[in-house]
Image (cartoon, grey):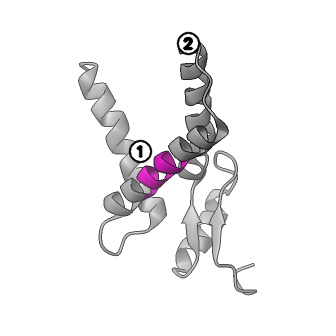
Amino acid sequence: MIQNGLLGIVEGANLPTNIEAQEVIRKHGSVIYIPGKASNAGGVAVSGMEMSQNAQRLTWKEEEVDEKLQNTMHNIYQQMVSAAGKGGTLEEGANRAGFVKVSQAMKELGW
């Protein structure tokens, strides 16, 4: 795929790209790789919105859900870029941002 001009891989599941494939992707800096933990966040976010609506007995219009989802995904992208730093990849940014979120939550819980 890379030899045929692959521009990027956006995972559609949790870790469908095995370690060997990830290493090949990393060797080709021109290929954008977004791991499932970031690309699948939209589904998780919409599920959370649905639970919130149900708990509050609300109904949001499709446009409102879409706007919230777009804002969420934009924020996730910005966090990946920020966490990647200068010269870092989106994969590195996703991993770093995820680690920071988990460690902050653990700290808030007193762990």
- Position of residue 99 relative to residue 18, above or below, is above
Q: In this rendered view, identify the residue nearer to me: 64 or 84.
A: 64
The kind of residue tagged 1 is Gly
- Position of residue 65 relative to residue 83, above or below, is above
Q: In the drawing, what numbered circle is on residue 98?
A: 1
Q: Quadrant of the C terminus?
A: top left
Q: Across the whole image, how many numbered discs are drawn on residues?
A: 2
Q: Quadrant of the N terminus?
A: bottom right
x 59%, y 52%: residue: 39
Based on the picture, tell me whether residue 93 belongs to the magenta stretch: no
The kind of residue tagged 2 is Ala
Residue identified by numbered label 2:
55
Q: Nearer the viewer, mark 2 or mark 1?
A: 2
Q: In this rendered view, identify the residue nearer to me: 61 or 28.
A: 61
**SS for callout 1:** helix
x 57%, y 21%: residue: 53
Q: In this rendered view, identify the residue nearer to me: 80 or 75.
A: 75
State left or right for residue 80 relative to residue 69.
Answer: left
User: x, y percentage for residue 19?
Assistant: 62, 58
Q: In the drawing, what numbered circle is on residue 89?
A: none
x 23%, y 19%: residue: 110
Q: Earlier in the sequence, mark 2 or mark 1?
A: 2
x 28%, y 19%: residue: 109
User: x, y percentage for residue 69?
Assistant: 55, 44
How far separated are the C-alphas under marks 2 and 1? Answer: 27 Å
Q: In this rendered view, identify the residue nearer to me: 61 or 49.
A: 61
Residue range corresponding to the magenta coloring: 70-77
- Position of residue 109 relative to residue 96, above or below, is above
Please identify the dominant SS of the magenta region.
helix
State left or right for residue 25 relative to residue 110.
Answer: right
Crowding at mark 2 (Cα within 10 Å: few <14, some 14-19, many 20+): few
Based on the picture, tell me whether residue 71 belongs to the magenta stretch: yes
